[in-house]
Amino acid sequence: MSVATQAPASAASPVDEDARWKYLNHIRQTPGPFTDPASQDEVAMRMFDNFKVLVIGAGGLGCEILKNLAMSRFRDIHVIDMDTIDISNLNRQFLFRKADVGSYKAEVAARFVMNRVKGVSITAHNKTIQEFDLDFYRQFQLVICGLDSIEARRWINSTLVTIAEEGDPDSIKPLIDGGTEGFKGQARVVLPSFTSCIECQLDMHAPRAAVPLCTIASIPRQPEHCIEWAHVIAWDQEKPFPKLDKDDPEHVTWLFNKAAKRADEFGIQGVTYSLTQGTIKNIIPAIASTNAIIAAACCNEAFKLATSSVQCFGFENNYMMYSGNDSIYTYTFNHQKKPDCPVCSDQSRPLDVDPKATLQELLDSLAVRPEAQLKAPSIRAEGKSLYMRAPPQLEEQTRPNLTKTLLELGLADGQYVNVTDKAFNTQFDFTLVFK
Amino acid sequence: MVDVMEQTPPLLHGPSEKERKYDRQLRLWAASGQSALESAHILLVNSGCGTVGVETLKNLVLPGIGKFTIADEAKVSDADLGVNFFLDEGCKGKSRAQCCAELLTELNPEVQGNWWPREKSSSFEELLGSPEPFTAILYSAPISEERLRMLETYASQFQTPLVAVQSAGFYGYFQVKLPGAFPIVDTHPDDTAIDDLRVLAPWPELEDFARNMTKNFESLDDHEHGHLPMVVLLLHYLEEWRKSHDGANPISLKDKTEFRKGLEAAMRRDNAEGGEENYEEAVSGVMRHVQPPALPSTLRQVFDYQRQGTDADSSFWLIAAAVKRFHEKHGTLPVSGGLPDMKAQSDVYIRLQNLYKTKARQDAREVLATVRSMEGGADVDSAEVELFCTNARFIKLINGADVAPKTLVHVTEQELANDEMAAVVGPEMPYSLIGIYLALTATTHLESASEEDIESSIARHVPIAAGQERILKAAKEVARAGGVELHNTSAVLGGMVAQEMIKIITKQYIPVDNTCIFDGIDSRCQVLRL
Ligand SMILES: [Zn+2]
């Protein structure tokens, strides 16, 4: 190529770090109408050089976040993800290639970005977040999440609230969280124990209502009803394979054929392979552009926070909602801390209950209440275990309580109960309010 | 006639590798959107720090755009490596266009990436003169006046959407210039947008169906009674209502509330469940479904639109005229054919669903016949007619040229007036971002500019903005950025621009009309028609 041969000398010369970061340094060193004068002094400059940041998730958002942090001159980054690369990731997780399918996401992503951007160190952890102790999390100044699981978000949120200690600013690890679904998404910042946390905002992510079992079993009307029937009823009856693997095309094809046959019997149209897979795996559409927007919005907050160049999300606004399907719309606001948040406040939360309901019914309701969403709760009243899932002896001992009503268990209006769930390292305090 | 929505051939061998790779996006824009993307060729005219355009291309290469071409005369510098991810140390001194094109195509082997200039002698005119026209053009500021004029000439000659983008410091904006009126049929309304159930304008077959099911109403056992579909309940009780109200329907809020009370009272409660789900569905559907057929303002705009010489998409306008005639004749739009899920026995629901589908097909056939009778209507695709009829209530016209465009001065005036209100209202009402747009566009043709230059340019073009505090601040902020891109700002904008180009290429979802301003300090956007 003629263009390549024009400047052979400079192509071989090493990159001057000051020249490389000329643009970024210009913004950091030039005062403007919105800059904090203190952000330009030596201390602030050095603080940013030593900033250590943790990225949770190396998927759609995670790949973008790693790129953006490296291009924002963060030098010391760790990334946690236990997932391996699937072919359906390749339309947006741009650090992965077809040859990488099956490898660990964290490892491949870290290697790619370190190769591309010299001077950045990225440490990959192919593990779950629950495998690390508090001291591990204490080493970072900032945590950025790009996750698709609400459970993992709640876990890291309560962990960072646990770490936060009054009077010790270093113990406050800001949590920046991004999420997307199709053309929509959100970016938010939590200052653990100071501002509204993920748990305070839980009701903004209410779980989708499930189809009643009787509809699936006897009166299907929609293609999804037929797919759920194949998934929860036909599979169990016929057990065509020892264990259902939702990523195995043979298994999905079996479900698809069963669902299609049932749909045919009822005259229902629209069962497809793609719908079958989407329904059983609860697939959420995901595209590169939304991930780019949300990840960059998160990293923009990270950069503002770490360099204190201009004001970032925190005590005032802390949440940006994004929607791109009808024009472009953002709503940036201050989500208020809930005074009865089970994670970041000391007050117990009122729980409306029917005194004639059984303990089992109460526990089931905790799974679907938008503000609780606890799938495997254990419950204790003052001095008394009502139902405990572990250890096995205690489970056996407390199991008979499940069929008793709250009145029969001797619980009273205004009684204080606490709920634990092995998915979270915190306890949820409630006050019973009888209806 | 074939109903396209039902054409789902059984898939016996599972999805192809390509379908698996694109699965998560096919769920948004389907095979039709994907094939539109794969036939598209995008030109990026790059300059300056050159990152925002490349970030945009990344988000188009990943979903599988057919081809792209980068026009950029710059050679890769050290500073490029600190802002542009699609360059590495080995690129230093080489053509930035070529290096970016090569590293971008790595992301998706199905995409073809080109660059310009390939040789010293090839001119920009030659690039624009290539035999195959570009599907859309994106240019990033700064750009010379001469080159911009060439692009504008090209865009008007070939009806090409032209997108401008600028990223500076924490600020940015982009603007979409469409060649003419741009109708979108497949707008993907939210699930909350309801199907048109026609309970106040039922056709005879639907009326008969409801009467038949409610004939021996009181003698139905609890199971049957609790499985009467919500639509049937609404039709039945509306008929009862009319009998006692001189044939009039409950239209006013007061009457609807009264009607709803009647429904609540009619629910059987002496059964095992202590209530009936289908009645609950009917009760909660009163306000939404008991609506006289209405013409949405967005569709009225389409009906009233006077086509301009520059407007393309002639089959759309023929169908629109035919649907307008249908509406004039019947007082209703064609039935969309959709029926939401509701508590019902399977066979009853399916029969009801078929009633709606049959009527939808019949209406679409009538529209098609009208289209066929019009000049140039012989070649119009029946599937296009069906899609129009199904989505009629949600069709949207972007960039309608007869909607008098407001001048920048006028819009600024309005925005400044809003700001005075915002100062009183507080954080609930955000301030306008127009100042950012004014300050950025003052540097469209400049690498960077001083605060004074920006202010005097604003004062020249929009005198009313001169000296306004928020606008002065924006000018200061743009001046201090000195034309420098921050990677994060460019990545946000690159995401939004790619998203908008995808909407335009696939003709799905609703594109921005027409300018989006991003403020990375406050972390928010504002869309204005400028
Ligand atoms: Zn909280």
Image (spheres, rainbow, N blue to C red):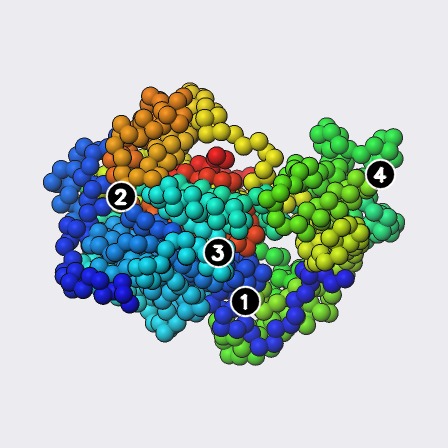
- What residue sits right under mark 2 in the picture? B484
Contact, mark 3 vs mark 2 (Cβ under 8 Å): no
1 or 4: mark nearer the eye: 1
Residues marked 3 and 4, same chain = yes
**Image depth: mark 4 or mark 2 in front:** 2
Q: Which residue bears the numbered disc 1?
A: A277
Which one is in front in this view, the residue at disc 3 or the one at disc 4? Answer: 3
**Which residue is painted at 28% across and 59% down in the image?**
B95
To which chain does the residue with label 2 belong?
B
Q: Chain of mark 3?
A: B
Q: Which mark is residue B240?
A: 4
* Residue bearing the label numbered 3: B134
Q: Which mark is residue B524?
A: none
- Image side of residue A338 versus residue A70, left or right: right
**What's the amino acid at mark 3?**
Phe
In this view, B229 is above or below B254:
below
User: Given the image, what chain letter belongs to the residue carrying mark 1?
Assistant: A
| Distance from the alpha carbon under mark 3 to that under mark 2 | 29 Å
User: Looking at the rendering, in which quadrant would you find the N terminus of chain A?
Assistant: bottom left
Residue beneath the point at 52% across and 48% down: B157
Instruction: Tell me whether the residue at label 1 lies in contact with that at label 3, contact meaning CB atoms closer than 8 angstroms.
Output: no
**Distance of mark 1 from mark 4, alpha carbons?**
45 Å
The mark closer to the camera, 3 or 2, is 3
- Give the camera-side residue of B384 and B351: B384
The C terminus of chain A - image quarter: top right
